[in-house]
Image (spheres, rainbow, N blue to C red):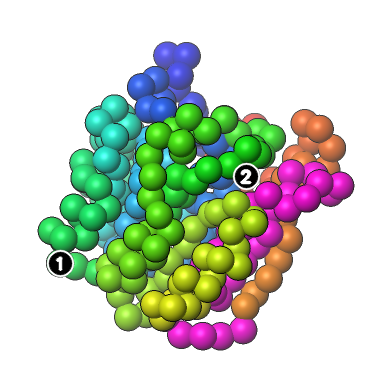
Amino acid sequence: MSNLFRFKQFSISQERSSMKVGTDGLLLGAWTGLDKHPETILDIGSGTGLIALMLAQRSEALQIDAIEPDPDSYEECVENFEASPWADRLFCYHATLEEFSEEVPETYDLIVSNPPFYTETSIPGGENQLKAKHSISLPFEDLLQASENLLSDNGSFAVILPFKETRHFTELAADIGLFPSRITSIRSRPDRDFIRSLMEFQRSSKDIQQQVLTVEDSPGIYSQAYTDLTRDFYMKM
């Protein structure tokens, strides 16, 4: 199948989903911290299921749930989960975040999201996701409030956003009691401006671990830092 993206331990079918495999999702799935050994994980806006599958490979979490409102993406996500080695730990809900928040009473130790946002930039190595990201709106306020409601007391919330939204998103999070613990600024090459922020939030305020990650040293040549981060997934790394 031409639309099958193969990783070292799983494959992603992306024939029908408008959210193709992209560098944003790969970065979030590989970067998200697992030092607290979460037992329950929630992926908001799962698309093909990429991030949830990466976290299933990286963790021993007993329950990894995903939410996907788009019918085609939902069906493909379910297929990708069922075809993976971790099918017994993965489940996708066909629902909006609002519907899920109202119906699910439990909380999660880790929540991740690669939310839809408007942007004119893309990272080399990833698919262009503008069409999908323009078609669905998820206001930051709604994402943060739902995540705060669904997050366990000692849980973490991880997200990837346009770099220009970093301060605004941090301020909105602080308003509801979520504070950044890690921020990694992403640029495509050493001479380029920052275009993404990987951000991790917790309920307690602490010193922020800040880093910079460059995806490519030169056109088509991945940096050592990006290679180290993603080597457990890419077939040729």
Mark number, residue 105: 1
Residue 237 horizontal/vertical position (percent): 66, 38
Which contiguous range is marked in magenta? 180-207
Q: Nearer the viewer, mark 2 or mark 1?
A: 1
Question: Seen in the image, is 169 located left or right of residue 154?
Answer: right
Residue 177 horizontal/vertical position (percent): 41, 80
Task: Specify whether residue 15 is in view.
Answer: yes
Q: Is residue 18 above or below residue 103?
A: above
Amino acid beneath label 2: Arg
**Residue most toward the top?**
1
Q: Residue at x 33, y 67 (%)?
A: 145
Q: Could you classify mark 1 by the number of other residues whose Cα lies within 10 Å: few (under 14), some (14-19), or many (20 or more)?
A: few
Q: Secondary structure at mark 1?
A: loop
Dominant secondary structure, magenta: strand
The mark total stands at 2
Q: Residue at x 27, y 60 (%)?
A: 62
Q: Is residue 228 above or below residue 87?
A: below
Q: Residue at x 21, y 41 (%)?
A: 94
Residue 141: image quadrant is: bottom left
Question: Seen in the image, is 206 located left or right of residue 93?
Answer: right
Task: Specify whether residue 9 is in view.
Answer: no
Q: Nearer the viewer, residue 49 or 205?
A: 205
Amino acid beneath label 1: Pro
202 in the magenta segment:
yes
**Which callout, 2 or 1, points at the residue further toward the start of the chain?**
1
Dots 2 and 1: beta carbons under 8 Å?
no
| Residue to which mark 2 is pinned | 231
